[in-house]
Amino acid sequence: MLLLKHPKTGQSLEINEFWLRDHCRCGECLNLDTNQRRYDLLDLPADVKSLEVKCEGIRLQVQWSDGHQSSYDLDFIFDSQLERLISRRSKSTNLTPWNRCIILQNERHLRFSLPQLVSSDEVVRSLVESLVRYGIVFIDDVPPTPNMTELALRRVFPLMKTFFGEMWTFSDKPDHADTAYTKLYLGSHTDNTYFCDAAGLQALHCIEHSGSGGENFFVDGLHVVHELKRRFPSAYDVLCRIQVPGEYVEKGEHHRHTAPIIRMDPLTGEFVQLRLNVYDRAVFDTIPQPQMAEFYDSLRKLLQIVRDEEQQWSLKLCPGSIVLFDNWRVLHGRQAYTGSRTMSGSYVQRTDFLSKARVLGIIE
């Protein structure tokens, strides 16, 4: 271990020498065009040691036993430690948990018109920023056609291709083995619990509806998880730990994935994902029977909070407005409906959503 002291802050840090050698940023060790390493880890001697260490201002010069010489920026070394990572992530999340009352007070921050979105990169940035903060936004003034829905979405994100397609249009025709393709009530849920990597965002656009009912409702999973942890900490722990299988089966398709209902960042303990869909739950075979009572009691507590009226933001999706929401955070559902109702929609991969937010400087 090397003991380093920052000349400006006076902070001390013990550094593993192999880590330091592995993080040489010179052009021999790092492709400066691609920002990728040039070597395999096994190319470094396991017992590599520093032979000479000099500190010149904020530059650290090291002569290594393998003959290599490195020059480091001390700020880079100190900023690349776990404590700094946790601090940066905690400060950069900037999320606003909401219930119905809170989101109605902030609805003005969620609305963006398509003409402004098309003509202004700053409006695109504002939309992504609101999507990160609240988990839900609306694109208004969109002609109610699948093509215009696609145009509006592609202005901000690439679309995710699944067995539903990149863009999909659905009604009550049984095109897929999914309750969404009916006129029935749909309780609050997240999509794709049966995928290894559930869609990060989901978009919905009501193209037409000639009947009654069909109001959509949205629930902030971030707020719900906070409430569960506050009211029932033992139930929260169970749902962070127990693996719950989801499954989707139709002709030519069989998707299955198992993961906890609540996923937290293992470094910061912050919320990452709520994976909740009572329709897609597979046969529950991941814990022994003596643990079932505790699991079901915990899940019921979560569902009761989700169904609290104060958590539910209900609104009628009308032709001309796309709702775009974080499928890892915001649950959605709808009332039963009558008449003819056609919806257009799409998914966006989580990695593409987060990449866009990082490029725009919204998250780290």
Image: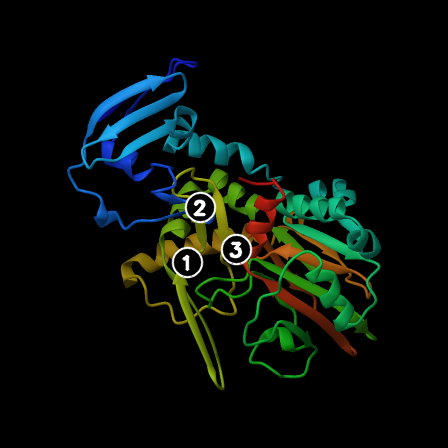
Q: Quadrant of residue 292?
A: bottom left
Q: Residues within 10 Å of mark 1 (few under 14, many from 20)?
A: some
Residue 268 in percent (x, y) is at 43, 37
Q: Residue at x 36, y 59 (%)?
A: 243
- Using the image as rendered, state which of residue 139 and residue 1 is in the foreground: 1
Q: Residues within 10 Å of mark 3 (few under 14, many from 20)?
A: few
- Disc 3 designates what residue? 351
- Disc 2 designates what residue? 35
Residue 51 in percent (x, y) is at 19, 26
- Between the residue at mark 3 and the residue at mark 2, the CA separation in whole angstroms equals 19 Å
- Disc 1 designates what residue? 296
Q: Are marks 3 and 2 in contact (CB under 8 Å)?
A: no
Q: Between disc 3 and disc 1, whose residue precedes?
A: 1
Q: Between disc 2 and disc 1, whose residue precedes?
A: 2
Disc nearest the viewer among 3 and 2: 2
Three-letter code for the amino acid on which mark 1 is drawn: Tyr
